[in-house]
Each structure stands twice: as C-alpha cells, then as structure tokens.
Image (cartoon, rainbow, N blue to C red):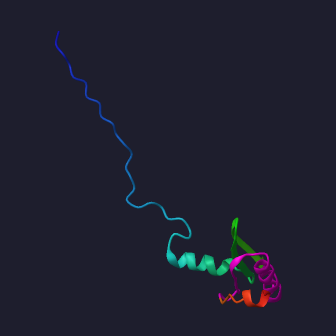
C-alpha cells in the first residue's frame, strides 16, 4: 500500500488594515461630545465611601446648595463644573 499525504489549506478572510472608526474615536470629536454633554447644567462631583458621586443641577445656587450638603455628609474632593467649564472647589470652609 502506498501512503498518501493529505494537505489541508485553511483560508482565513482578509483582515482589514484599519478598524472602522466609531463616533468619538478622534480627539476632536471627543472634545465636542464633552462640550455638548453639559447642556447648560452645573455638574457636582465628589467622592464618598461608596465611590464617585455625580449630580447635576440647573442653577449655580442649587449646585452650591447640593455641594455644601455633600461636604456636610462627609464627601471629599467636591467640585462644581459650570456649563462654561469653570471649576468651583471651595465648599469645605463654607460648610463648616
């Protein structure tokens, strides 16, 4: 008996050189998303024993009130970011 060798060829689909891009994949689009995300809201953020606290309020007065409440409740690194991107951070002295 003669031995015959079988040879299998596996053909894989062609791999694209670059993956398709999703919206937000480039830095400029991420900046626009970040800018549009605020929509006139004041963002309050901080940390507590459970992790990150992130809230939004429509006015600076409401955001200041909530930030002071968070500090009084034991949160740290509390800050407010206004719709223009300005950061407010001095609530610890005001809450004491």
**Res 91 seen here:** no
Residue 49, quarter of the rendered image: bottom right
Q: Residue at x 16, y 13 (%)?
A: 2
Q: Horizontally, is 95 left or right of 15 in the view? A: right
- When the figure is inspected, residue 74 is found, relative to residue 61, above or below; the finding is above
Residue 55, quarter of the rendered image: bottom right
Picture coordinates of residue 20 (x, y %)?
A: 48, 61
Q: Is residue 8 visible?
A: yes
Pick the residue in front: 74 or 45.
74
- Residue 69 vs residue 16: left or right? right
Numbered circles on residues, count: 0
- Per the rendered image, the range of residues in magenta is 57-85
User: Residue 60 magenta-drawn?
Assistant: yes
Does residue 76 show up magenta in the picture? yes
Going by the picture, which residue comes out furthest to the top? 1
In the picture shown, does residue 64 fall above or below 17? below
At 76% across and 80% down in the image, what residue appears?
71
Residue 65 percent across, percent down from the top left? 82, 84
């Amino acid at each position: 008996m003669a031995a015959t060798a079988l040879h299998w060829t596996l053909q894989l689909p062609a791999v694209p050189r670059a993956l398709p891009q999703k919206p937000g994949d480039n830095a400029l689009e991420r900046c626009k998303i970040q800018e549009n995300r605020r929509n006139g809201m004041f963002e309050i953020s901080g940390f507590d024993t459970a992790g990150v606290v992130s809230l939004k309020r429509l006015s600076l007065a409401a955001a200041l009130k909530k930030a002071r409440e968070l500090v009084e409740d034991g949160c740290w690194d509390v800050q407010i970011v206004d719709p223009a991107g300005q950061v407010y951070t001095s609530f610890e002295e005001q809450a004491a």
